[in-house]
Amino acid sequence: MTKYSKIILDIINTSDEHLTAEQIYMRMKSQSCKAVMATVYNNLNLLVREGLVRKINVDNSPDRYDKIIRHDHLVCKLCGKISDLYLEDLTSKFESDCSVEFESYDLKLIYICEKCKTDNM
Ligand SMILES: [Zn+2]
Ligand SMILES: [Zn+2]
């Protein structure tokens, strides 16, 4: 693992937000790390490939990066805000339902967050 991928992994694992590559880059800068944006992307891809970081796709919003500890997400369909949910692990249920062995699943519950509800009243 490179020096930068360690720093990036640390930023992701200690954050409760769901950071974009850009935000990770800004945090590295604030730790006076001299990496360029391309390095951040390369290392993020590497970490995702190695299964150390989870990438989350959200419609109309840049990819976010997250810890790999098992959890699900609640996503606001208006502003894209993501919150963590710790639901029951459904892997074995899904495996018996679809009779294939899969690596992981990505469960998103779509809602409208409090802030968007208020803003749209
Ligand atoms: Zn919202
Ligand atoms: Zn999460």
Image (tube, rainbow, N blue to C red):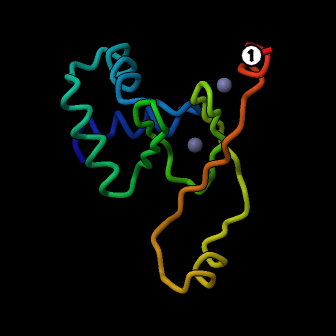
Q: Residue furthest front?
A: 121
* Residue at (48% x, 81% y) in the render: 101
Residue lying at 63% horizontally and 51% vertically, measured from the top left: 72
Give the image location of residue 30, x and y in percent.
37, 13
For ligand 2, give the image quadrant: top right
**Where is 97 relative to 87, above or below?**
below
Which residue is pictured at 47% across the width and 30% down the height?
Answer: 19
50 sits to left or right of 112: left
- Mark 1 is on which residue type? Asn
- Residue 106 picture location, percent across and down: 54, 56
| Side of 38 where 24 appears, left or right | right
Q: Quadrant of residue 75?
A: top right
Provide the residue designation for mark 1: 120
* Nearer the observer, 62 or 89: 62
Residue 33 locus on image (x, y percent): 27, 20
Give the residue at x 49% y 83%. Answer: 100
Instruction: Give whichever of 59, 25 is nearer the camera.
Output: 59
Q: Around disc 1, counting alpha carbons within 10 Å, would you say few (fewer than 14), some (14 to 19), or many (20 or more)? A: few
